Each structure stands twice: as structure tokens, then as C-alpha cells.
Image (tube, helix red, strand yellow):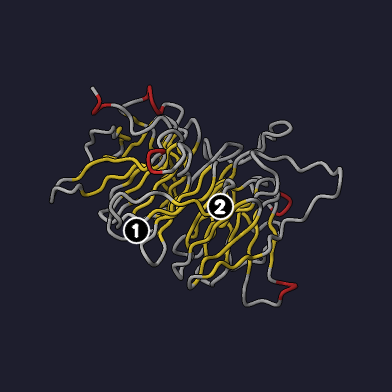
Amino acid sequence: MGDSIPVAEYVVGSFEDSKGVPWFGTMSHGVARYAPAPLAGVRTLTYIDTALGLPPEGGHSIAEDANGLLWFAGHDGVYTYDPAVPDARVKQVFATAGRVGKDRGGHVWVSTDRKLYQFKDGAQQELKSPVPPRATGEAPPPYTIGPGHIFFQLEDRQGRYWFSTDGYGAYRYDPMAPADQAWTRLTKADGLCSNTPWAIAEDREGRIWFACVQAFQPTATGDGGLCALDPSTPLRVGTFRSFPDVPGLHHNDLYTLLVDRDGALWSSAFKHGVYRYLNGSFTLFNTTDRPDLNGNFGLQAMMQDSRGRYWMGFSGGLFTLQGDRLVHVPRGGPWE
């Protein structure tokens, strides 16, 4: 039956907008949303897809600006969409692959074509990438998709911006520092789990967490994992904490992080499950009602909505957490 079909085979992005509408990026159907239908009180799952101008892989990341405009980014470009306009079509902003995010001031950041842009007060401002250019003929470092790509991740409570890269580690930008001291680079040599952090998050204590993946080009590096940085210590060797004794959190591919409303950190762990870190200990969630769909636990996206419900996008479909079980949410729900 159609109601039991997964939202998509790969759910790779998740976001809740200012009106409480959940959005889910996919690799085959654009962006799905569970939103009010024209008939008052009835909600339905709809897709923003090729019919409205968004490519199938156009929603790997999603953000909302101060005007309620939705920003989508994926393999084919960066787009905007106005959900308040009936029958609105998606508009392309950049024609190159990218990611989008939002800082604490509500400004949207676009990372595309190895460049960084902040959209602030109606203006597009570029922040020059700190990734060093390669000399002619110089081989790139080990990488996963595109060496030198840099992505905005977050603005911490100190007003500093954090960026991930493919193959060059993580960067922190302090806009209040002198220009020649504004950028700090952190790599595997400093204790980072790999030079390709895929997600970065800040917890309530101000610790910065990194979910890292291994490089696959030209060969697999076999590293990756979860590590944390205590901002009260100098940013140098020995300041990172890793978790080699926790199965799946060391030398593994980790794609997403979440800090929930209770202050717990959630982390993906490929082929192991989903971890919650709270009060100094890890709890593993690896019981699923559909192991045929998400048995490899390829968790790509995670969010907690305004009602406290957890949504998890796997290679295999969309799931929610009910007690200690991961429960599949197909197109027909249950959504409430």
C-alpha cells in the first residue's frame, strides 16, 4: 500500500521551520514536508521536487531566513522557496553544489564552490576561505568528495564561526580578532579524529563536538569518529577527547550530531546505532522495527522538533524514537 512506502530511500536532511512544520531532504524526491493542507485542521505530506524546480538531490541541508524564506542546498545547487506563496516555485541562487546553515543572529550562510557567503540585511557578503590553494600539480590531501570544500557549521556562544572541510580539518573564525589571527585551523595532528569533520555541534557546557568521517580518495584512511574540544584549554595537541572504548565512535564514519533540549548530545554511529551522551555516559539505541531498511544504521540527519519528538533520517527512510526503539515513519505516518 502507498501509505507504507518510505518517505524516501535516503533521508539526508531535517529541519523544523518557525511555524513548526518539519522538512526532510532526500536524495530522490527533493524535500518532503508535513504541513497543513488547504482544508483547515488537516495535515499532509507533500514534496517540493522537480515539478516546482527542485532537483531530486536538492535538499541535503535546509535553513530559514528572517523573512520566512526557505533555503535548500544539494548536489545541483542552492535554492530558495517561499512556503507562504501558493504554488510558489523554487528559485536557484547558485548553480554549484553546496550547503546552507544559519548563525545565532538568524543570518543564512551558503557554502558553495569552495566559497563562503553570509546573507545579512539583504546583502550577500563573502568570507574568504582559509583553505590554502594547491600549487600547480600538487596532489590534494586524502578526501571524501571534493578536496578543499568548506562548509559553515555553527556560531558558538562566543560569537566565533566554525567550519568543516573535506580533507583540511576544521577551521574557527573569530571576527573580533586581528585579521592575521582570525582563523584557527585544527587537524588530525592536533587530535581531531580525521581531517574530514562532517558535523560540528556545541553543547551547553560550551564543548565543541566533531563527527568525523574517513577519507576515501585516493584510498580509505580508516580514521573518523567522535571527538570533543574543551574551549577552556588551548587549541593544541591533547585538547581533544576521543572515545576509543565506545564501539562505533572510533575509526568509524559519523555523519550527524544533535544537542537536544535537555542538553544531551546525540551522535550517529555507522553500523552500530545512535548514541546519546548525557551526564558523562553513552547510551546506544539500536533496536529498530524495520532492520530491513535501516539495519546498517547509516544515520544522515537528526532533529528534535518543538514538541520534543526526535526525527532521524537514515539510508533507508525516516524514523522516530519511541522509548528506546527506532520506529519507521512511512508516507502515511504516524506523524503525530
Residue picked out by circle 1: 261
Observer-nearest of 326 and 237:
326
Q: Which residue is mark 2?
A: 94
Residue 256: where, in percent of width, then height?
49, 45
What amino acid does circle 1 point to? Arg
236 with respect to 93 (left or right): right
Q: Amino acid at mark 2?
A: Phe
Q: Residue 169 location in percent, x, y?
A: 67, 51
Q: To which quarter of the image does residue 239 belong? A: bottom right
Relative to residue 110, is residue 275 drawn left or right?
Answer: left
**Mark closer to the chain start, 2 or 1:** 2
Which quadrant does the N terminus fall into?
A: top left
Q: Does residue 244 appear in the picture of this structure?
A: yes
Q: Nearer the viewer, residue 126 or 6?
A: 126
Residue at horizontal 63 percent and vertical 53 percent from the top: 150
Mark 2 burial class by Cα count in 10 Å: few <14, some 14-19, many 20+: some
Q: Say which quadrant the C terminus sits in.
A: top left
Quote the CA–CA distance across marks 2 and 1: 34 Å
Q: Position of residue 241 (x, y in %)?
A: 59, 52
Query: What percent of the width, then of the height, locates residue 263?
Result: 39, 58
